[in-house]
Amino acid sequence: MSLGVFELRRLLVRQWTRRPGRALATIFSVAVAVGAVVATWVSADASRVGYKSLTSAIEGVPAVDILSRAGGRFEASDVPALAGIPGVRAVVPLFYRPTLLRVGEKRVREIAVGVDAERLVAIGMLELSAGRACTAIDEVVLDENLARSLGKVVDDEILFFARRGVRRMTVVGLAVPTSLRWFGEGAGVVLDIAALEDMSNALGLVDRVRVALTPAADRKGVVEAAGKLLPDTLVAEIPAGRAAMAEDVMHSADLGLDFVTGLTVAMSWFIVGNAMLMNVTERRRSLSLVRLLGASGRQIRRMITMESALLGAVGAAIGVAAGLAAARPIAAGISRSLQAPFTGLVVHPAIIPLSALMGILVAVAAAWWPARQAAAVDPLEGLANAPPPPSPGIPWRFVGAALVLWAFATGMLGLVILEKLPPRAAVPAGIAMLLSFVAMTPVILPPIARACAALVPRRFRIERELALAQILRQPVRTALTTGVLVVAVSNGIGLGHAIRDNVEDIRGWYARLMSADWVMTPAGTMSAAAEGGGAGPRSAEEDVRAIGGVDRIDVIGIAAGRVAGGACVIVARDVPDDAPLPLDPVGADEATVRAALARGEAVAGTVLARRLGLVAGDDLAVEVFGRKTKVRVAALVVDYTSGGASLILRRDAAKRLFGLESADVILVTAKPGEAAALRAPLQAIADGRGMLLRSFTDMKRFVDGIVNGVVGSLWAILGLGFLVGSLGVANTVTMNVLEQRRTLGLLRAVGMTSRQVTGVVVLESVLLGLSGAVIGLIAGLTTALFIQIASQPLLGHPIRSTLRPTVILANMLAAVVVTALAAWIPARRAARIDLLEAVSSE
Amino acid sequence: MAILRAVHLEKTFAAAAGSTAGVMAIRGVDVEIEPGEFVAITGASGSGKSTLLHLLGGITRPTAGKVILEGVDLAAIGDDDLALVRRRRIGFIFQRYNLLPELSLVENVGLPLVLDGIPEARCDAAARAALETVGMGHRADHRPDALSGGEQQRGAIARALVTAPAIVLADEPTGALDSENSRRVVELLRSIVADHGQTVVLVTHDPGIAAEAGRCIRMADGRIISDTLQPDSPGRPPVARQAPAHRGKSGGKRPGRKR
């Protein structure tokens, strides 16, 4: 179809120039829809960047590890060249060994890491606060906190206990602790890798090769690409640790963002469809006249389609620009809430062309129904100048569409629950479920609208009847409007419940895990397994015990482990008999869990259990730093450490089974009223040991900050839905006013005041809002249930769901307020109807 | 041979809300229109005269019966074919002119040709020629809202003629005009019949205007109650015809006409 054969183009252009408002309204709707999609998409990307930044803040540098499949050390030369894989920043062989440092009379148990320090410094991945990188066999770089606690500076000497005896080594540099995190695994001493291997009689061997990635790299993609290159003896995997937790959180949030983006696209369809319908309905008379003069239905359809494509293209161009402009403050806000620096919008190259194309396609697709309506317009309508006739009966096509969508949604959900499909498949399923509710709107709207109208006081009877009649007159158009509201409200209610339920689950877990007044953590994030007794954090624990006013100390040790060929986290913690169980067992009572832990058995996080198909009573071969031990899983617990891929034991059992006795986290509970008094002595101990001291309130604030950031970013995007929904309502109510010109004019002629006319229009809008909100409530609660069921495979445990009246009321109120505000312009238009023109229009 | 023929024509409108029975607007009408005739259909409001005109013009479809234009049954063809017939073979004139306000007069007149895919230059030339015929050539580039009612109606007549249709159907074409403009419009219609041999069917409830036609069909309650030739009327066709006497009924019975 080209403009050359587009017979009615002149009429179309004249219509645009004569009534630019109508064309502009359509362009505006497309712009709003495309803008909403662009803003949502870019904001969602900003959230993802924020999450990644959060990951980096926790872990330092995102990475993938190359490990021996059989466990233990392996030849570094077995690792093929991996630098060519997209997203790979550096390939770093690592060699760890526990050691003992002697400084004067002080002995400190530490982990030493062998690495090509000179190269890491050169490429900016190891930052020194003083001195230079170690290169010779008798040179070390110390964590600056460790150096301070040992009282050492550059050029000082320390004694290093190695397999070949004691070596005198010179401190040549001090490392910034955060720059050690991504490869140090808690190590405070850095040596040249060849020197450490030589001292350990393991020349050429490494514990792992850490492949550092760029922030935007796709970890799973790198794992897959590396896996294809590696020999059978080696395996690539994402390191376990807090980053994995962040990654799992990100994965869940990713699904949420995908869901919201998908819904925005669906919503944009309703808005553009509504605008196109309005555009066509307003011109019914001239279209019917053209039909009367001999235009075929095909010609009318072609005219409407061409118009929608042209207006869609203009609207899409404006929408892209507006969306990018709107995304900037939203993305900045999201970055702020995720505590990530905002360095400008990250716009995926596909966003702009795809959004623009979507605008045009959605406009053309949305015009399909109005074009059909226009082509079928009765030529007599043009002569009678009457409003279009009401649609009779139940729109069975919509019922059929709803059933098909519902069947698709439940089928997909079923496959997700059965793990035949990945959790991401729940996104289109959720959207289909929501759309099925929208498709049912023409059927369920009349009784709901009548019920809502019954709430209107009797003195507004005339206004109520007029408003209700107009709403029910065009169920399809009303469905398009309420569809936007249904999506917005059900989004708010559904995701609102799901988010709150998830957040409370995380907070509940955190409160059980970290029930204390003060929390002490080392500068690093995770310790390697330590051997034997010694100083270091352990002595910090003893120092804390010596302070008066301490009621209880809980110590948690964390180590990276491997189980069934995958990464997991070993958590060793005190489980005092006189305190509440700091775990949340699933399907087991506390007494059983306590007894099993006391026997030296472990409990497994639900995600780990789901991944490995574990049940209580299974025996597992667990490897920690090359040491394989069989552990019995006594029960499953809700745990978000490492995204739930954790194995939790009592400290005494962890020491016996793995030699793990590190104290990575020390939780200090003060005696009543003594919490504040403990700050000074605890701070002194922390300073002396290179540890961080935070109050539980600070920790809670930190975690809350992260959680609120994730929640806030979703709410910000959901808020767009209501804004966009209000435009749809304004469109429909304007259209209704145009159709009611004669009726409203006659009513004005017989004495209805302009205020009463305004009342009719506002009431119509509010009834639409209320009806949409009620249907949205039903859809929202279903969505919440849907999300809860769909997230089970991801979390490995059911989330307790609570009915939240505040979330429901807030969303429904927002729908009503937004629709009442949206009626303002059409209501003014209605009040200004020219009586003479209105009564003589037939 | 009749150019337009209605056979046992019936039209029932759907029941209004709250009512079960439909409204039967046309009850078994049979009528034939010969080429070059100037026919007036008269009757009181609600007698069905406009509905009959709409049925004859393929604007609405009959509930029963046939409308045969130049051998084609309009009730039996699809929507798009019907649109094609309206575009090429029927010219319409309405009481309210129904010019598209967005287009200039010449564009309005050329619209049926544009819809037919005829190149713009030819459409423009044909439209201007049609406007000259009705004495509106000097107002060709004005918008409808800049014209008087009489001028708009003459423009509408030009639009009805531009495709050289088989028949022109006019629904109360003088209903919105003052007497002077009414007279000019009727003269124009009469002249296109007399000078161009055009067939015109006109609906009016003005006996004075009906008297100008060569044949007058009177309707009541959806039926033809009389169908008479008017020998002395200025609109009488060149070949003299004899009108049948009023039979007082038409339901299912074709009104006979003597030539």
Image: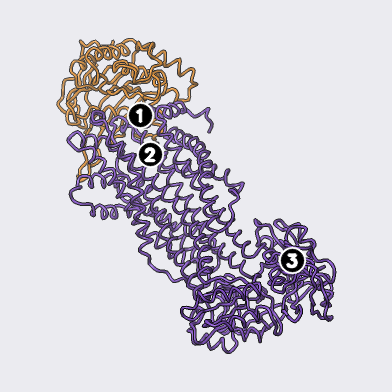
Chain colours: A purple, B orange
Tell me the kind of residue under disc 2.
Answer: Met
- Real-space Cα distance between discs 2 and 1? 18 Å
Q: Nearer the viewer, mark 2 or mark 3?
A: 3
The answer to whether residue A115 is seen in the rendering is yes
Q: Earlier in the sequence, mark 1 or mark 3?
A: 3
Which one is in front, A824 or A193?
A193
Q: Name the residue under label 2.
A: A278
Q: Mark 3 points at which residue?
A: A174
Image marks 1 and 3: residues in contact by CB distance under 8 Å: no
Which one is in front, A178 or B216?
A178
Q: Mark 1 points at which residue?
A: A289
- Real-space Cα distance between discs 1 and 3? 86 Å
Residue at 43% in and 47% down: A724
Tell me the kind of residue under disc 3.
Answer: Leu
Which one is in front, B173 or A70?
A70
Instruction: Check disc 1 and report its element: helix, strand or loop.
Output: helix
Q: Are marks 2 and 1 on the same chain?
A: yes
Q: Nearer the viewer, mark 2 or mark 1?
A: 2
Q: Which of marks 1 and 3 is in front?
A: 3
Residue at 66% in and 85% down: A657
